[in-house]
């Protein structure tokens, strides 16, 4: 099998102070750490990274099954070396495969086809793109939308820097990155639908949804992780921002799937039809005048929910405001004793006072 490799010699003032936390961090995120002949080796599903100390420099070699995998490994290693180097900014330059990459391989330009309001505060935009198949996976539902600065005459698209990180022609006016979910996709038409919450105090993401017109070109990076895992019993929780993900997962699951869904929305006008053929029961929780991110209805619902007996494979998925995320994740871990693989609870946004 062909593999792709890139190398970099990096002068680190204190290599241990960088490599120890880097390896710990990557191990927490699924890598397996091995030590062999004075080397540290981090093994991932589709590649590995080797660190070897020599006089005056740390030699780093990344190996992956394909160029996209190599791009991600180089990016991750470079980003974490810089993060754990503190005030020091070591020079990183990759040699080997992947040198010809001009744009990140997960970057695409989406063209707006049309937009309409699904409910008063949820706007659906249909985009067309060259390759939408990469968004069909159910374990990687989201993407980053690049919202351009209004005063730029032309959109800025990312380049791949020699250090493996994204690079911008005008770094001071690089686009805002906002995370959204692919609500649905049509492989033959090469289209994806994304549902944008139109919230008060609109930021770049919500603003883009309001201003998008047919023919507009929008940069997108993705997909990113954070989707469905197989289980015997599901619990899905979320507010409007997580509704696209929950609806997509529900529409994917077979009629034998069972469990519960709690979706918090502003009021009954925000309730949507979901083509749910599973045996999962959907309950809508209405804020009825309370501000988004200010209620305890999701955590109250989890506390009251009856979980199945021991031995059942459980999967709890939740996306919501930061305070609710903290309360729900804490409850699931401390009071329900769920393992890492049994829950995915993510803060989708943070309410600012
Ligand atoms: C993995 C992931 C997937 C996501 N998928 C979706 C999706 O499919 N659709 C979607 O609409 N959102 C989604 N979100 C949430 C979205 O990224 C955030 O709501 C984001 O803050 C919106 O950006 P903005 O530029 O509109 O506002 P920001 O610039 O981030 O914030 C501006 C102001 O608006 C407030 N604010 C932000 N979001 C909300 C909100 N939902 N309700 C009320 N006030 C808000 C902030 O507190 C701040 O005061 C997702 C988030 C994650 C992490």
Image: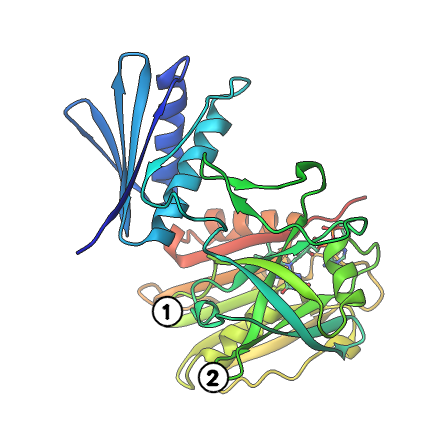
Dot 2, how many residues are within 10 Å of its Cα: few (below 14), some (14-19), or many (20+)?
Answer: some
The image quadrant of residue 304 is bottom right
**Can see residue 339?**
no
The image quadrant of residue 299 is bottom right
The image quadrant of residue 207 is bottom right
Q: Is residue 113 toward the left or the right of residue 249 in the image?
A: right
Please tell me whether residue 145 is drawn above or below residue 213 in the rendered image: above
Total residue callouts: 2
Q: Residue at x 76, y 71 (%)?
A: 213
Asked whether the beta carbons under mark 1 and mark 2 sit within 8 Å of each other, the answer is no
- The numbered dot on residue 120 is none
Measure the C-alpha gap from mark 1 to mark 2.
13 Å
Q: Residue at x 72, y 57 (%)?
A: 205
The x and y percentages for residue 226 are 48, 58
Establish whether ligand 1 lies closer than 8 Å to the Cβ of label 1.
no
* Element carrying mark 2: loop
Question: Mark 2 — residue?
Answer: 278
The x and y percentages for residue 252 are 46, 79
Q: Nearer the viewer, residue 21 or 285?
A: 21
Please tell me whether residue 89 is drawn above or below residue 109 in the rendered image: above
Q: Residue at x 17, y 56 (%)?
A: 1
Please tell me whether residue 275 is drawn above or below residue 100 in the rendered image: below
Q: Quadrant of the C terminus?
A: top right
Coloration of the structure image: rainbow
* Element carrying mark 1: loop
Q: Residue at x 51, y 17 (%)?
A: 88
Give ligand 1's quarter of the image.
bottom right
Question: Mark 1 — residue?
Answer: 231
Q: Nearer the viewer, residue 309 or 350?
A: 350
């Amino acid at each position: 099998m062909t593999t792709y490799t890139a190398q970099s010699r990096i002068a680190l003032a204190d290599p241990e102070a960088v490599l120890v936390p880097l390896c710990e961090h990557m191990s927490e995120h699924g890598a397996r750490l091995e030590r062999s002949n004075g080397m540290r080796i981090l093994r991932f599903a589709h590649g590995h990274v080797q660190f070897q100390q020599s006089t005056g420099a740390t030699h780093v070699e990344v190996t992956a099954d394909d160029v996209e995998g190599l791009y991600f490994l180089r990016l991750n290693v470079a980003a974490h070396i810089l993060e754990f180097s503190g005030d020091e900014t070591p020079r990183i330059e990759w040699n080997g495969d992947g040198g010809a990459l001009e744009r990140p391989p997960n970057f695409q330009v989406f063209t707006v086809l049309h937009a309409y309001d699904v409910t008063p505060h949820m706007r659906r935009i249909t985009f067309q793109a060259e390759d939408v198949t990469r968004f069909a996976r159910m374990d990687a539902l989201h993407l980053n939308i690049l919202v351009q600065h209004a005063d730029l005459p032309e959109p800025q698209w990312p380049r791949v820097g020699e250090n493996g990180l994204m690079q911008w022609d005008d770094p001071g006016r690089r686009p805002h990155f906002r995370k959204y979910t692919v609500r649905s996709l049509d492989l033959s038409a090469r289209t994806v639908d994304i549902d944008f919450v139109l919230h008060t105090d609109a930021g770049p993401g919500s603003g883009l949804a309001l201003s998008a017109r047919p023919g507009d070109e929008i940069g997108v990076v993705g997909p990113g992780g954070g989707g469905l895992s197989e289980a015997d019993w599901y619990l899905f929780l979320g507010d409007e921002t997580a509704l696209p993900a929950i609806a997509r997962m529900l529409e994917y699951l077979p009629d034998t799937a069972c469990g519960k869904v709690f979706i918090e929305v502003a009021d009954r006008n925000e309730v949507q039809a979901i083509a749910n053929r599973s045996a999962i029961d959907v309950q809508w929780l209405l804020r009825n005048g309370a501000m988004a991110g200010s209620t305890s209805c999701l955590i109250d619902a989890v506390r009251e929910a009856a979980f199945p007996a021991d031995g059942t494979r459980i999967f709890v998925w939740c996306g919501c405001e930061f305070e609710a995320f903290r309360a729900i994740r804490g409850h699931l871990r401390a009071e329900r004793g769920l393992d890492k693989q049994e829950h995915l609870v993510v803060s989708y946004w943070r309410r600012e006072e």
